[in-house]
């Protein structure tokens, strides 16, 4: 694919956005929508847009969240994406195949029923699961060895499904190109350069008694200057904020996906099993999930493992075959025996930028820097709304207006006046 690259002779901008994933692209788009006269640059280390964790996600969407904040961010973003695909006629690969939650305890059921007051969720007769290859009863030896329990309830979230992140990113990118936003690809940001507001030209400044601001960023292509800098850098945020003493409040944790296939999957993945068009995105007990990929005739399998998975970061993470064999596969074959013979035909790994406190995004200002991070694995499905919140924060607005008319207090997603509920449904 041919990618336009704009390199301005004047490296001074009103706004410089670091990161060309969904959050960065959405932010650039919404800022340019509100301020057509602003000179905006988007900088990214990769050769094109959406090459970080945006392109490594499970590519699902849902508005099934326990916190009102996450619900507003996701539901409004989904409605905007639906508008782009259905009204504007731009294919985003969105298919409302639903999210099927399989429950083995009352506490999980209570959470889903509570969420069902905000969005469309349908209880599924357990007898229907047999035709999908799902066993509601666990074999006794497996129950004893693994501590798994029978499936007691099943719920299908309807405003949910699968999408193609590269197509959503391409939409935003093309809109930004049309608005003459400059893009710097293959450009690594090395540092945020802190300087005094009133320099005295003395070695070692800025001193603690001097007011400070970020004057520029150092890159492999030279310095880029801006009045406002926006970090949409996901798990890379800490590497830029830590050296200047700003806490991004996130930690990285590796996530893995495994593409699996056999004759059963090829036969069932495209079937309209629950009136959703194809096999639904299905979440089993212990958090293991399968994401349908009808075009490939495969399932993508994964899990957001918590305790036992370290907080760490390497630039190019690799999926671990043994993690699938001894963790994901064991749960899948316990509840879905036809998957016992499925083979792994592909695998990849990326990261969640975890907000470990409440699971909601952080969007806050410090000096002339705005940080948007901590999406905790749901950045794509909340991406449009996050871009609108960043644009509102840039304008100093108390409330951000989302696509569907809902409003959210910008300070609620900040640090000092943060007011959000803990998100209990991070997948």
Image: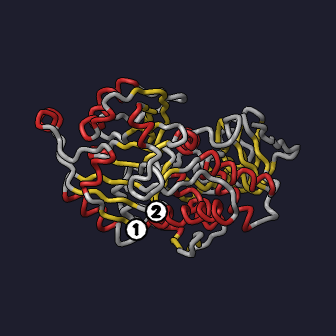
* Residue 121 location (% of width, % of height): 36, 65
Give the residue pinned by disc 2.
159
* Residue 182 location (% of width, % of height): 79, 48
| Label annotation for residue 323 | none
- Where 203 sits versus 96, above or below? above
**Residue nearer the viewer, 301 or 357:** 301
**How many numbered marks are there?**
2
* Residue 310 location (% of width, % of height): 36, 34
Disc 1 to disc 2, C-alpha distance:
7 Å
Q: Is residue 233 visible?
A: yes
Q: Is residue 376 visible?
A: no
Dot 1 or dot 2, earlier in sequence: 1
CB under 8 Å between discs 1 and 2: yes
Q: Residue at x 43, y 39 (%)?
A: 267
- Where 401 sits versus 228, above or below? below
Give the residue pinned by disc 1.
120
The residue tagged with tag 1: helix, strand or loop? Answer: loop
Q: Residue at x 40, y 54 (%)?
A: 99
* Residue 15 location (% of width, % of height): 73, 55
Q: Residues within 10 Å of mark 2 (few under 14, many from 20)?
A: many
């Amino acid at each position: 694919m041919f990618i336009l690259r704009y390199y301005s002779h004047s490296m001074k901008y009103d706004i410089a956005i670091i990161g060309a994933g969904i959050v960065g692209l959405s932010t650039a788009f919404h800022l340019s929508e509100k301020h057509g006269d602003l000179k905006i640059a988007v900088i990214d280390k990769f050769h094109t847009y959406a090459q970080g964790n945006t392109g490594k996600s499970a590519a699902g969407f849902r508005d099934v969240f326990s916190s009102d904040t996450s619900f507003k961010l996701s539901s409004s973003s989904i409605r905007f994406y639906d508008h782009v695909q259905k009204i504007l006629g731009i294919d985003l690969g969105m298919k409302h195949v639903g999210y099927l939650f399989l429950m083995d305890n009352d506490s999980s059921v209570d959470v889903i029923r509570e969420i069902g007051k905000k969005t469309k969720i349908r209880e599924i007769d357990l007898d229907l699961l047999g035709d999908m290859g799902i066993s509601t009863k666990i074999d006794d030896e497996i129950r004893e060895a693994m501590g798994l329990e029978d499936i007691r309830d099943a719920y299908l979230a309807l405003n949910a499904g699968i999408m193609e992140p590269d197509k959503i990113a391409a939409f935003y990118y093309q809109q930004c190109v049309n608005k003459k936003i400059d893009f710097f690809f293959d450009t690594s940001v090395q540092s945020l350069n802190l300087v005094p507001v009133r320099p005295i030209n003395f070695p070692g400044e800025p001193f603690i008694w001097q007011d400070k601001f970020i004057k520029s960023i150092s890159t492999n292509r030279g310095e880029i200057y801006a009045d406002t800098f926006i970090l949409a850098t996901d798990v890379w945020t800490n590497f830029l904020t830590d050296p200047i003493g700003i806490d991004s409040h996130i930690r990285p944790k590796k996530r893995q996906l495994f593409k699996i296939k056999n004759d059963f999957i090829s036969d069932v993945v495209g079937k309209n099993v629950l009136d959703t068009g194809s096999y639904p995105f299905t979440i089993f007990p212990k958090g293991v999930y399968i994401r349908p990929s009808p075009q490939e005739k495969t399932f993508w399998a994964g899990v957001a493992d918590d305790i036992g998975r370290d907080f760490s970061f390497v630039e190019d993470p690799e999926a671990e075959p043994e993690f699938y064999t001894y963790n994901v596969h064991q749960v899948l074959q316990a509840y879905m025996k036809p998957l016992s013979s499925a083979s792994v035909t592909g695998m990849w790994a990326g990261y969640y930028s975890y907000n470990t406190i409440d699971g909601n995004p952080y969007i806050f200002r410090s000096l002339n820097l705005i940080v948007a991070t901590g999406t905790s694995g749901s950045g794509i499905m909340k991406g449009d709304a996050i871009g609108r919140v960043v644009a509102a924060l840039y304008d100093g607005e108390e409330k951000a207006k989302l696509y569907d008319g809902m409003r959210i207090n910008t300070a609620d997603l900040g640090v000092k006046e943060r007011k959000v509920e803990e998100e209990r449904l991070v997948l």
